[in-house]
Image (cartoon, rainbow, N blue to C red):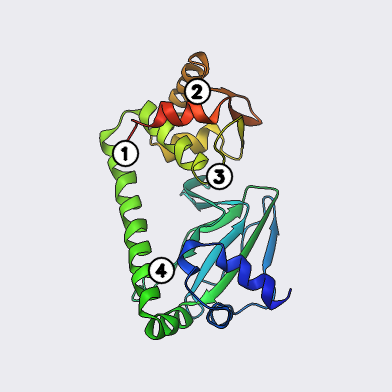
Amino acid sequence: MNSELKYWYLHDHKLFRNLSYSEIDTLCILKRFKKSKKHEVLDLPFNQKERVYFLKHGTIKLVKIDEHGEEILLNILQKGDLFGDLNFDKEGEHEEFFKVVSDEAVICTFFRENLESVMQRKPEFAISYIRFSGFSFNKIQNSYKNILFKDAKTRLILLLKSIVEKENISEGKYVISNFLTQKDIAQLICTTRQTVISLLNELENEGILSYSQREIAIHDIKEFRNFTQNVK
């Protein structure tokens, strides 16, 4: 894969928009992007010189195995997400692992030390990084707020809203391929599987969406955005 394509893979993310071609090229440590297929467990060497990962295409989930051998879903990542250890001072083992849930995922990676080097040469990029990291931290804080202070229906709506907002779709129908099982959704919004079924049925009766084992279909994006506008 050539350098020009590598540049645009990274340049899609707002964090990298102010970097030059050579600065983007400095960040990359792979001459080819890693392509992974559905159900593949990603072999990402977090403990080797601390890397940062960028999901160009597809959807992956962060999971861990509990004491009973069951998968516990921790997070869903979609295209455009950076992931990995973004804290320069943090070290240690990572017990979690990533699994591809879309048909394909495309991931690129770079060393944190290279990122730090670019930040030292380009103060405006350092500011963008700090803002981006702050946004990520606030997002984590807000997710805990949702768990603690929102009812289950609101948490479900906020989850669906966060998935839809990743897509640049302003109108028409939107289908979320059902990479999230009822159990996955229950884990993400901290409720029971039976409650998730009841809530999906309720939203279906309200005409917001339709649900099957294969997909969650939102009938009208514009109406859905209006419906979720005051849900926080």
Front in this rendered view, residue 182 or 51: 51
Quadrant hosting residue 180: top right
What residue is shown with label 4?
86
| Label 2 crowd (10 A; few <14 / some 14-19 / many >=20) | many
Q: Dividing the image into 4 quarters, which one contains the C terminus?
A: top left
Front in this rendered view, residue 76 or 26: 26
What residue is shown with label 3?
167
Amino acid at dot 4: Leu
The residue at 43%/24% (across/down) is 195
Numbered mark located on residue 116 in the image: none
Asked if marks 1 and 4 touch (Cβ < 8 Å), the reply is no
The residue at 47%/72% (across/down) is 18
Amino acid at dot 1: Asn
The residue at 35%/51% (across/down) is 139
What residue is shown with label 1?
146
Q: Which is more N-terminal, label 4 or label 2?
A: 4
Residue 206 image point, x, y percent: 48, 15
Asked if marks 4 and 3 touch (Cβ < 8 Å), the reply is no
Question: Which is closer to the viewer, label 4 or label 3?
Answer: 3
Gap between marks 4 and 3, in whole Å? Answer: 24 Å
Gap between marks 3 and 1, in whole Å? Answer: 22 Å
